[in-house]
Image: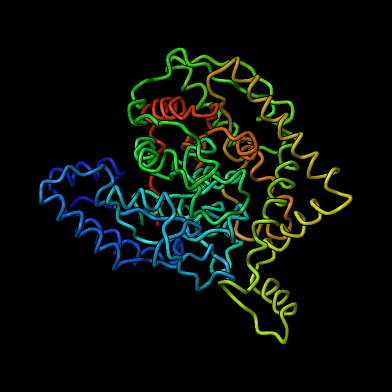
Amino acid sequence: MIDLCAKPIHELRDLLRRREVSSVELTRAFLTRIATVEPAIQAFVSVTGDLALEQAAAADAARSAGEDLPPLAGVPVAIKDNMCTNGVLTTCSSRILANFVPPYDATVVTRLRGQRAVFCGKTNMDEFAMGSSTENSGIKKTFNPWDPARVPGGSSGGSAAAVAAGMAAGALGSDTGGSIRQPASFCGVVGLKPTYGLVSRYGLVAFASSLDQIGPISRDVEDAALLLNAIAGHDPRDSTSAHFDPPDYTSFLQRGVRGLRIGLPKEFSGEGTDPEVQAAVAAAVRKLEELGAVTVEVELPHSPYAVATYYLCATAEASSNLARYDGVHYGFRAPADNVIEMYSRTRSQGFGEEVKRRIMLGTYALSAGYYDAFYLKSLRVRTLIRRDFDAAFEKCDVIAGPTAPTPAFRIGEKTSDPLAMYLSDIFTISVNLAGICAISVPCGFTEDNLPVGLQLIAPSFGEDRLIAAAHAYEQATEWHRRRPPV
């Protein structure tokens, strides 16, 4: 019997087109899988079973009527719970939005509906996407399918865990400082952070508006290309949306890497990186060389300042963006005797500790007397980081390195040390600061059977390079075929 929940999107698409399975049958298989596995993994904030079956039946009817359907038609996918879904709970895994049901869809959700994709649920996350482990969720903790004693990464930990555990064929996540790529690395799946502006942010609940970007989490690179095809493109409702006509990203899958110049920054192999991670990434680079790529040394001299820069830029924007949650218009409202007390109680009770920490950091950085010393200086360093990448890409086509310095860490291991938690994104943050694109693909496992991710980075709108290189590496190895024991 075919295990439908273990197959990637492109194989499910072919089964549906050949009428070997119906979308309703496929959706029932995934809903059964969710019912079986979700108690152990806790990847979903809400499971939309009735909606999924309704969408699946509509896709089957359209196929029976002879319609030429898009690749995602009838395929069950999951959506991170910070993307607005009309009529469906959208919580950002926060108490302050515990009962919020949006009256509209995010643009990416609209585009998935246009593809006739099936929505199987909304996934858990660090509250307002602030975290690297999904332990900061205000609703529940999500567990890594490879080892339930470990985190799935964050903030898109629910999406990555759902895909890894076979509860969704693919998923959307958001990436502000590594929140797609790091959980993809920890869960042994593919995560692609697109160029800033390639995918609309309309309807994405904002954390840090100049850094946030929506992207796909998938079983393999071909699926990532299919999902990116579905969601990429200009949106007039997003003022930061790029006027760029995206190509068919699946057309780059067979390009290969012969002659591709891969930059190796010395800053990505420094102290603090787990030896098993270093070994797996080095082996992946050697495999790319065997496939015809050439390696060159590059420098990213300001990358050691990326974490500090990020946690000034991001928290300043968070302070501004989260000011709207005051108990007046929507969401949680704490009872109080007067308006000022209501504001204070609502925000202190509605936000979790990490969100409050970042709001305070950002408010401090923007305050009178500190704006120039902290926030303005962080913007200047951000420009230097972007220039470092520009200079590096004059010497190479893509940059390679680890996605994360370690494999998935144990639950509770870093919750008492925020700085240690922040450093888990040390290799991903600079990509968001520069506004460029990157992908994480599985490249090995540790002795404890934990996945390791290879990160490939390309210039703005260089997703074609990422997909070509990542797919060539993936097809030459077997790492992406391994499944967790759950």
Q: Which residue lies furthest to the bottom in this view?
A: 337
Asked if residue 94 is positioned above or below residue 199 in the image, the reply reads: below
Where residue 302 sits, quadrant-wise, is: top right
Is residue 193 toward the left or the right of residue 481 in the image? right
Q: Which residue lies furthest to the top in this view?
A: 259
Residue at x 69%, y 65% (from the top left corner): 353
Q: Please identify the quadrant where the C terminus is shown.
A: bottom left
Residue at x 29%, y 62% (from the top left corner): 52
Residue 477: give x, y in percent of width and height: 39, 30
Asked if residue 449 can be seen in this view, the reply is no
Is residue 448 toward the left or the right of residue 341 in the image? left
Residue 310: give x, y in percent of width and height: 70, 43
Residue 146: give x, y in percent of width and height: 47, 52
Asked if residue 296 is positioned above or below residue 100 in the image, the reply reads: above
Looking at the image, which is closer to me, 61 or 426? 61
Asked if residue 373 can be seen in this view, the reply is yes
Residue at x 74%, y 50% (from the top left corner): 419
Looking at the image, which is closer to me, 240 or 226? 240
Looking at the image, which is closer to me, 402 or 180? 180
